[in-house]
Image (cartoon, coloured by chain):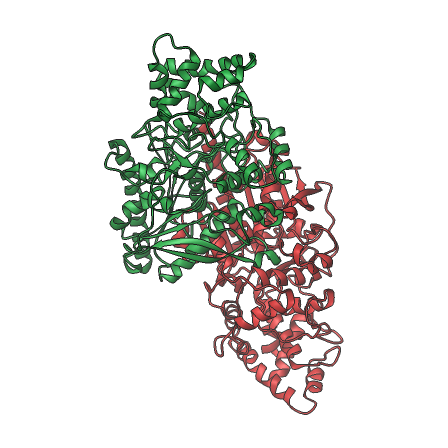
Chain colours: A green, B red
Amino acid sequence: MSTLLTLLYPWVSLLSIILSTITINIVSTTPTYNNNIPRLSAFLRDSKTEPQTLSQDFQIFFFNQTLDHFNYGPESYAIFKQKYVINSKYWGGPNVFSPIFVYFGAESPLDDGQITYSAGIINDNAAHFKALLIYIEHRYYGESIPFGTFDEVMNSVTIRGYFNSAQALADYAEIIVYVKEEFAAQESPVIVFGGSYGGMLASWFRLKYPHIALGALASSAPILNFDGISPENTFPVGVTKDFKEASESCYQAIRNSWFEIDNVASQQNGLSILSQRFKTCSPLGYSYELKNYLEDMYSKAAQYDGPPTYPVTQICSGIDGAPEGTDILGRIFAGVIARIGNTTCYINDIGNPTSQTSGDTNGPQTTDETGVGWGWQVCSEMVTPMGQGSDDTMFQPRPFNATNFINDCKSKYGVTPRPHWVTTYYGGHDIKLVLQRFASNIIFSNGLRDPFSGAGILEDISDTILAIYTAEGSHCLDMVLAQQSDPYWLVNQRQIEIQTIEGWIRKYVADVNAFRK
Amino acid sequence: MSTLLTLLYPWVSLLSIILSTITINIVSTTPTYNNNIPRLSAFLRDSKTEPQTLSQDFQIFFFNQTLDHFNYGPESYAIFKQKYVINSKYWGGPNVFSPIFVYFGAESPLDDGQITYSAGIINDNAAHFKALLIYIEHRYYGESIPFGTFDEVMNSVTIRGYFNSAQALADYAEIIVYVKEEFAAQESPVIVFGGSYGGMLASWFRLKYPHIALGALASSAPILNFDGISPENTFPVGVTKDFKEASESCYQAIRNSWFEIDNVASQQNGLSILSQRFKTCSPLGYSYELKNYLEDMYSKAAQYDGPPTYPVTQICSGIDGAPEGTDILGRIFAGVIARIGNTTCYINDIGNPTSQTSGDTNGPQTTDETGVGWGWQVCSEMVTPMGQGSDDTMFQPRPFNATNFINDCKSKYGVTPRPHWVTTYYGGHDIKLVLQRFASNIIFSNGLRDPFSGAGILEDISDTILAIYTAEGSHCLDMVLAQQSDPYWLVNQRQIEIQTIEGWIRKYVADVNAFRK
């Protein structure tokens, strides 16, 4: 069933650059092999799936949101309309402490597919908990854009400035407080949920607003992906590990392929040869177009290397299964075919390499907003250095170059990234030391096949700040709508998470009752 | 010795209004009997005491501070110079986990008296802990004013907007992180200290930045003084209680005096009669000048009703000790004389009624900055409703009128106060329920004679979030420099606080060592 639904999908740096050139003028129009913009996933909707429409149980609202929560100047009194959605069908009411489950939108529009599928865990458990469900769109995405079109806002140096995580968390706080009042549910326990960037937001929300959220489920949240806490090669090392574990020979083929591609490209008519061998829909202009395409495909395959498709295995079946005597480029192309399927031509959209995929946990339609929006967030606040050395991954060396990164961001946006701000505001260094005697009620869930898990929390911090992960899971897998075909370990992971949340709520109710005595 | 040192002093609403009229043009030039601006104390320096100069152990620095931590627009990249002071004389160095004690400046300039006296507790204990001492001035006060003079900044609707507590906490975070790096003290435990508004900041800092501060001592921090958590009459009820406990007859005389003053004032030449009876230095223009003066004197007396002066007892001695047959106005004036001392005339400065006092825990020189600055903070973010009903205090009825308050602020600053923001951002409602299973290492200290203690935390929240108070103590008394004459209960309170902090540090060191194994 998952082919029909919104899908989790990674967002890779290069795409944002290229998409930026299409949609707004603030970036260079020449796509370059940019080493410096870090990746992060986004929830994106599958272009091939049927559009999901929300049932009447979901009501859409717009909140009069404060533009700037941390300023009392003229801008701060500007308000904009922020979209949120409520499903009260299962709501047990305030008197029985029925919880409120809040899904945090992240770096993409809060569309119907996200609500029905990406936020599946709250939908699946609403009836059991008699929960009120709230889904909130992140500011500056979708229909929650202040004062104009997305392009206009992203071109306004002033309005763009308020597009950041601290403001987004304050938005969530305001809306939750407001909805609780509207439902006379001030005492109802609130649990917040999010995946990837949304998972970081969920965990940070519990840390910053414990008086509003009783607990948080932060799925695949790479909160250590800042300020040098995790090594910069964490992601590509994770990708490499997935391929190596799937097949040593597949891994070797990929590892050796970059040299082969460069070698062919450097010959006369080399790009033509590569275009022919990979049956590209249009001739390659640069060899990096092919290399980026492949790197991106491998990265996403690893990020979403889970059931039912297991795209890493899929690619490696192609590579390993090529007839004996097939050369490296032939094997690599066999991997592409295995992943994409048979079609008349390949790699027709460098900016969106997997839009042709038929894989049921892939195949997103990337949105311009995500590319541009996340590009901005990365260049201002969400500075997540990523790079790889000469011998630590199956990819070519590409160490993170902070100077280039800063200069790129400066030239694009006129701002200097603040690489230390996330750790200053949210913490992250020595996180176990800090949080083992502070805070409570956070689940950090991960699937270890997801390379982002390497920058996540994989060890319990305390009795109530837990790491719940699966060896076989992928990015945000526990968050999505349950399927009949889900493997036992995924069912089990979700069950532990839900039981944990039930425990938080039970303790909370006991506390409230103790106070009332 | 305390006469020679900086003194704790309350800041009462009316003063800020009147002072505002002197220094900036944004407020009305006619002083009115304003009911709506809440009070809050400030640390202010005694005008009569000898100026304190810092020894060479204290080094003054200026940090390049970000104007707006929550925005990536052009203003946010503006930096200003923020003053901080370091004393490393006692510093044991990073290797032995010597702590860093940080004093948070609040709504007044970080002058020498504050450093040496108001922050006394960190000075008194520096040698014992081998602590590094840091004192940080609050943005927009003293020498930490962005881009111009104080008056210029307060007249700039744009720059003024960044004058709020969330930005101030972020300032503290940035400076502490920076100083730790400079001293290679990343692992050194940080304890933050503050009194009154500074105490609120200290407790909120531990809640928002647990990765930067291991613990907080929040002295006389009325963090429940928001959004209707504490009743609006908490402060005047506390003042009344102090007077009633000191002397029932004194309390009755004060309670009856307002009617008498109004009665005389309504007669022909009534203001002249009042001016004569109270020996005012210049003729009274309105009866409320006298009433405000008295209310202010009683309020401050209660707030600082502690050793060695016990100003409430002092005033009541005057009132009760007047010769038999003295009428109510005569008794009230006797109370003024008892508090102020014999002088040629009284009430010569309506805006600063106690500048004549000789009392050694009183007698501040109010600063224009505190009046104007705190007036702004109250009208934007720090909305602390205060009022009194018809029969709940010894004062005349004066219920809080939210509409008037909002209109006043709008007309002064053009902004609408956000009365719910403090509780949305920092919490406060159901604080024990929320924090008993979240957070740790905060001491809320109070002296119960201080009427602000009624809006403070007076019950332990958990094993590590403690209420440490004294029945006989006054506002921020535990924070100030220890004196030979300090009573045993004050010595004891400080000892418990210090032992508690020692326990936090000991546990932290054990945790670090456990991690290193």
Picture layout, residue A13 above or below residue A144: above
- Can the viewer see residue A303? yes
The residue that appears at 53% across and 62% down in the rendered structure is B452
- In the drawing, does residue B47 fall left or right of residue A12? right
Total numbered circles: 0
Q: Residue furthest bottom?
A: B268
Residue A65: x and y, percent?
50, 56
Q: Residue at x 53, y 70 (%)?
A: B402
List x then y, in percent, for residue B429: 43, 58
Q: Is residue A292 above or below residue A52?
A: above
- The answer to whether one can see residue B70 in this image is no
Q: State the residue in front, B48 or A21.
A: A21
In this view of the protein, which residue sits in the foreground, B253 or A454? A454
> Is residue B254 positioned above or below A42 on the image?
below
Q: Position of residue B310 (x, y in %)?
A: 59, 65
State the residue lying farthest toward the top.
A325
Q: Quadrant of the C terminus of chain A?
A: bottom left
Expressed as whole percent of the image width and height from the top left, the position of residue B342 reads 72, 73
Vertical arrangement, residue B231 with respect to residue B344, above or below: above
Quarter holding residue A345:
top left
Quarter the N terminus of chain A occupies: top left
- Toward which corner of the image does residue B123 lie, by quadrant? top right
